Image (spheres, rainbow, N blue to C red):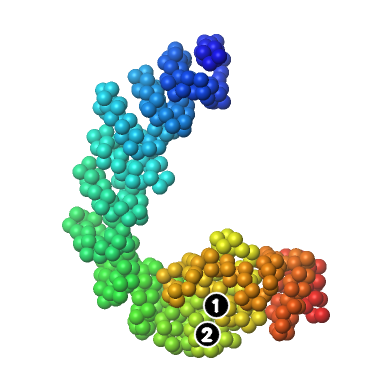
Amino acid sequence: MVDMAIELFIELDDRGLPSDAGMHTVLLKAIVEEKGAAGVLDLIQRCDILRPELFDILCNKSISFLCKKGSPETACDVYVVMKRKGSVVTRKSYYSILEDANYALRFFAKIRECGWTTATIPVTVFDNLTTNGRVLDAYKLIRDMEDNLPRMDVVDYSIMVDRLCKGSHIRKALDLCEFARKKGITLSIVTYNSVINGLCRQGCLVEAFRLFDSLQKINVPPSEITYAILIDILTKEGHLVDARKLFEKMIVLGLKPSTRVYNLLINGYCKMGQMQEGLKLLLDLEVKCLKPDEFTVSAVINGFCRNGDMEAALGSYFDFKRDGHLPDFLGFMYLLSGLCSKGRLEESQSILREMLQTRSVINLLNKVEIDVQTESMEQFLFFLCEQGRIQETITVLNEVQSMFFPVERWRTGAPSGPEKLKEIYDSKAFGIAASKSSLSSYETDMNIKSSDAENTVKNYAEEENRSQLCDFDSYFDHLASLCTKGELLEANKLAKMLTC
């Protein structure tokens, strides 16, 4: 039956009738089931008389099909037939053959045995390997196919070097840089920045600075990013004097530090308790017509909190807020921790309210809902805050912090992360209810439906000391949101039940 199908397929082409990809797939499946992978090679040889364009389509389809079926050797044989006939091999076919790097090397050894010593593959195949998380395979192919590589430019090498560095393969990245230089490629500062950053992340500061010092000798001037990378690692290691020297050097060279570079130094000084130096840099930042961002605000607040100066921390918070700048999640946490340690719970509650209405914090809490598979974390925290359960709210926020900023978490030895957060959310630890269903009443962000409003008040009514909860002001945000969205019936129903 398969032989008859092949004859019919060839006859269709003889008569000039079209065939489609679905027909090719059905034919290939039938051949493999009856004759195995070798049957596909036989098909290709019998179809040698097809029109060139149809023959190329069939061969490329066969290569992809055979590779998916676990027969790369036969796919290689099809490739050899195509090369002999002068057919065009598509990128998809190349990528299918190169799915396994070790086999790919054997593949190229085989085609060289056939006399094609100049056989190469498109550079886009290396790009695909690199961008699909297979940079080590791409690196291995480049090193083993040294004399048969396609023409690659500085961008191709830079992308691969960057991925190697981010994967902590520093030695291979350096080796690839040397390989590129031998090929006559002049590497740019972008490439060297990737290597310097990789060395710093691996703790190889001496090697990073040696490479930095050598840039001038090879006529590759460092960029603002180069200095930012080195200033970052120096401040993290506590070498503020050296970091400041680099900062001043880049200014002398005519480079303009960005807000990010200022933040690195401001944060470094504030963490070391050198608030005056940090504030001087903050003033200099504003003189240079740069705007502080949420990280700047958080660094200053953290510095004051570390020194125990909560008046200055609050003062800076309100000054920044007046100018339209709020801290990030960590900045709020620094401030809340400091206030709670001083027993200033009313001020903590006020800061918490503002925190839970800040867009960057809301976005982070939305990610928590996805990772932990909970309902509205924002509503959960809002409920705790409005009941005055500040310490409990901060406990939950600490777990959120441990998920996204593990280095910043206080090391208590207690379990943390998504599992712990889920446990807290689902438990009765805060006396919210005896099951998940009571928490599910805080469903959408600021979008309470009428049935949800009834369940919310019903569940809360069972709580002791609910006078604060029943206060209209504590639900103002809920009501305002409903009114804004035009859901007046639900807003009226919630307001009536709260005032009963």
Does 298 sit left or right of 101 as displayed?
A: right
Q: Pointer 2 and pointer 1: residues touching (CB < 8 Å)?
A: yes
Q: Residue furthest left?
A: 217
Dividing the picture into quadrants, the one containing residue 41 is: top left
- The residue at the point 25 percent across, 65 percent down is 205
Quadrant in the picture for the N terminus: top right
Of pointers 2 and 1, the one earlier in the residue sequence: 2
What residue would you read off at disc 1?
394
What residue would you read off at disc 2?
340
Dividing the picture into quadrants, the one containing residue 390 is: bottom right
- The residue at the point 52 percent across, 85 percent down is 340
- Where does residue 485 sit, x and y in percent of width and height? 73, 65
- The residue at the point 57 percent across, 66 percent down is 422
- Where does residue 113 sit, x and y in percent of width and height? 26, 25
Q: Check disc 2: other Cα within 10 Å, few if <14, some if 14-19, many if 20+.
A: some
- Where does residue 388 sit, x and y in percent of width and height? 63, 83
Does 268 sit left or right of 330 as displayed?
A: left
Q: How many marks?
A: 2
Q: CA distance from mark 2 to mark 1?
A: 9 Å
Residue 211 versus residue 6: which sits nearer the camera? 6
Q: Would you say residue 147 is visible in this rendering?
A: yes
- The residue at the point 58 percent across, 71 percent down is 424
Q: Secondary structure at mark 2?
A: helix
Does 147 sit left or right of 478 as displayed?
A: left
Q: Check disc 1: other Cα within 10 Å, few if <14, some if 14-19, many if 20+.
A: many
Dividing the picture into quadrants, the one containing residue 387 is: bottom right
Quadrant in the picture for the C terminus: bottom right
Question: Given the image, on which type of amino acid does mark 1 rest?
Answer: Ile
Question: Given the image, on which type of amino acid does mark 2 rest?
Answer: Cys
